[in-house]
Amino acid sequence: MLNGAIVGFGEVARNGHWPAYATSAEAEIVAVVDRSADRRALAESLRPGLRTFETIADLTASMPVDFVDICTPPALHPQPILEALARGWHVLCEKPFVLDAAVVESVRRRANAAGVAVVPVHNWKYAPIVQAATAALRDGAIGTLTRVEIETSRIRAAPTAEADGTNWRRDAAMAGGGILMDHGWHSVYLALHWFDDRATGVRASLHHPPAGGVEDEASVVIEFPSGEATVDLSWNGTERRNTMRLIGTGGAITIADDTLEIRRRTPHSTQSTPSAQSTQSTMSTKFASALSAGSHHEDWFTAMLPQVVACFRQP
C-alpha cells in the first residue's frame, strides 16, 4: 500500500479524489496539507485519525509519505511539486500541470534524477463513453483518424472553494488563463491520445469579456501529421454540453454527451456507380451518465488511479 498526502483540499480533492482513494487497495491518503484551517478541519471530520498540516514542511517533519496528490489552483502547483521531488516522493498533479515551460523541464530533470514519477491528471480518458470511443478507434472501426472535433459548452466557470466567494478560475494570476486552461487541457490530451502522435502546429482565437479578465471562449486548431483537431470552448453557452467527433477514412465516432454513435463505411469495389461504392452501418449506445454531468468525476478518477499507481511503482 502506498501512503499519500493530498495537497489542497478544495472541491475537486474532496469530491473527486478523496472518494476514489477510499475504494483503492493500492493507495491510501494518510494526510492532508492545506493552508486553510477550515478545510483541514473538514478533512479531519471525514476520517478520524487523519493527519492534517498547514505546509509540506510540517508534513515532512511529522511523517513519511510515498506520494503527494496536488489539488491546489494552477499557480500553486510548482512549489509542492518541487518540494516533493526534493524528498523523493512521487507526484500526481491536477490540471493544468504547470504554467511555465521552463518549470516543466526542471520537474522532468529532477524527477529523473530522483527516480520518481510525476503524473498529470488525465481523467477524461477514463470516462466510460470516452473509453468505448477509444477502443473502437483502436480496433479500426473508422479506419485511419484524420480529424477530431471537440466542443465544450458551459454556462459559467465551475465554482471553487474560496471562502470569500471569488473564483480562481477567472483569475489570470492564479489560473494562468480561462476556459482554455480549464477545459482546453482535457481537449488537448484527448486529441494527442487519439492521434497517438506529436502535434506539428497550433493556432487559436480567444475571446475576452468586455470588462476584461481571462478568456471565456476559445477556438483552437491543432495540426498533426495525419490530420487536425479542432477545439471550441465556451463559458457563455446556453446549455451544459459536450460533443466529440472522431472522423476517419472509414467512418466516424460521435460522442453526444450520453450517446455514442459509431458509423462505419464499408467500400464495395465491385459496384460501378459512385453512389453505390460503399454502404454504411450505424451503432448507437446510450450511457448511464452524460459526459457533461458533474465536475468532479469520482468514477473517472477511480478508473485512472491504477495506472497512476503503476507509474509510481515503476517510474
Image (cartoon, rainbow, N blue to C red):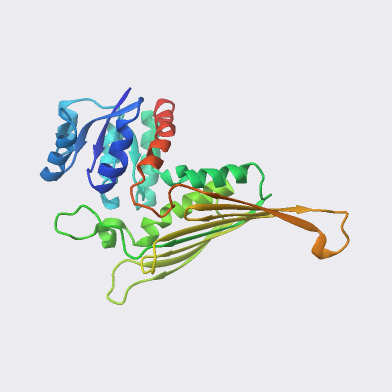
Q: Position of residue 199 (x, y in %)?
A: 55, 53
Asked if one can make out residue 226 in the rendered structure from this viewpoint, the answer is: no
Q: Position of residue 142 (x, y in %)?
A: 66, 50
Q: Which residue is located at x 26 percent, y 61 percent?
A: 171
16 displayed left or right of 307: left
Nearer the observer, 255 or 134: 255
45 displayed left or right of 288: left
Q: Which residue is located at x 48 percent, y 53 percent?
A: 258
Q: Which residue is located at x 50 percent, y 50 percent?
A: 190
Q: Quadrant of residue 215?
A: bottom left
Nearer the observer, 31 or 57: 31
264 displayed left or right of 72: right
Residue 88 versus residue 260 in the image, above or below: above
Nearer the observer, 225 or 46: 46
Quarter of the picture containing the C terminus is top left
Residue 187 versus residue 206 in the image, above or below: above
Q: Residue furthest bottom?
A: 210
Q: Position of residue 266 (x, y in %)?
A: 75, 52
Quarter of the picture containing the N terminus is top left
Residue 275 versus residue 134 in the image, above or below: below
